[in-house]
Image (cartoon, grey):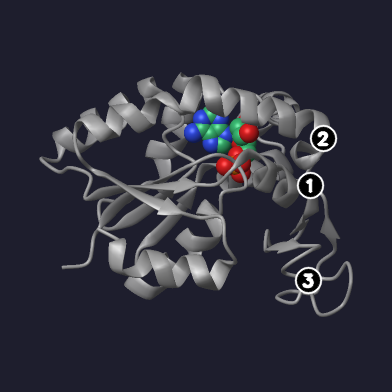
Amino acid sequence: MASNRMVFLGPPGAGKGTHAAWLAEDRGLQHISTGDMLRVAVKAGTEIGLAAKVYMDQGKLIPDDIMIDVLFADISDTGWILDGFPRTVAQAEALDKRLAEYAAELDGVVLFEVDRQTLIDRLMARMTCEACGAVYNRLHRKPLVEGVCDVCGGKLQQRVDDRPEAVTERLAVYDKQTRPLVEFYDRTSRLTRIDARGAIEDVRLAMEPLLP
Ligand code: AMP
């Protein structure tokens, strides 16, 4: 049976968003990216967006209590892939607690493993559509027309947090606050490791038979 509730775990630039998008479409699941949710809030100038922007621009994490509220306001009780949540042990525990209230549990956690230099190269080359959020890469995934989104015609730009200072901070934050989740999920044997260093299509083909 196709898996209904999955977490995609891994450092920034590992490809979680790209692979979550096609898998969600393929299986009819909700793709929940907390980073995208926060960027929408920032753009709309909501109270949460204004508070979040300061942390995001510096590559730091939004405090757990805010983040947990943001996520649970949007999560459905049907199938989903979480992309970018949980990022701390407290968030993972909050998720487990919430699932337990529905007598549900995670079907699987997929860990995307990529070496540090590849992550840095990918993040620095990433371009995002300011209108629809579609993601491109100056090296491997160029738009048809430079600077213009293939999907909606919007303008492509570099995310503030893909600039060098913020990238360094985000990778350090991952090591300190998010990497402990590997052990957290390994202990409960829900973790599938994917070698995500290759090209998108190669990773996709390799991961399909391994998915929960
Ligand atoms: P992402 O698009 O997943 O790389 O997220 C971009 C930024 O949003 C992160 O660097 C954090 O500042 C914030 N963010 C996204 N998800 C979370 C989360 N689960 N916990 C805390 N901060 C988050």
How far apart in space, not on screen, are marks 2 and 3 (Cα)? 21 Å
Asked if labels 1 and 2 touch by Cβ distance under 8 angstroms, the answer is: yes
Which quarter holds ligand 1? Answer: top right
Near mark 2 (Cα within 10 A), the count class, few <14, some 14-19 or many ≥20, is: few
Q: Residue at x 53, y 19 (%)?
A: 176
How far apart in space, not on screen, are marks 3 and 1 (Cα)? 14 Å
Q: Residue at x 79, y 47 (%)?
A: 124
Looking at the rendered structure, the kind of residue marked 3 is Lys
Q: As rendered, which of 93 and 47 lies closer to the eye?
A: 93
Looking at the rendered structure, the kind of residue marked 1 is Met
- Which of the two discs, 3 and 1, labels the residue nearer the N terminus? 1
Looking at the rendered structure, the kind of residue marked 2 is Pro
**Residue 98 in which image quadrant:** top left
Question: Farthest residue toward the bottom?
Answer: 144
Mark 3 lies on a secondary structure that is loop
Q: Which residue is mark 2?
A: 164
Residue 142 badge: 3
Q: Residue at x 72, y 47 (%)?
A: 123
Residue 31 location (% of width, % of height)? 44, 57
Q: Residue at x 68, y 58 (%)?
A: 133
How far apart in space, not on screen, are marks 2 and 1 (Cα)? 7 Å
Q: Is residue 54 above or below residue 36?
A: above
Residue 124 badge: 1
Residue 139 shown left or right of residue 42 in the figure: right
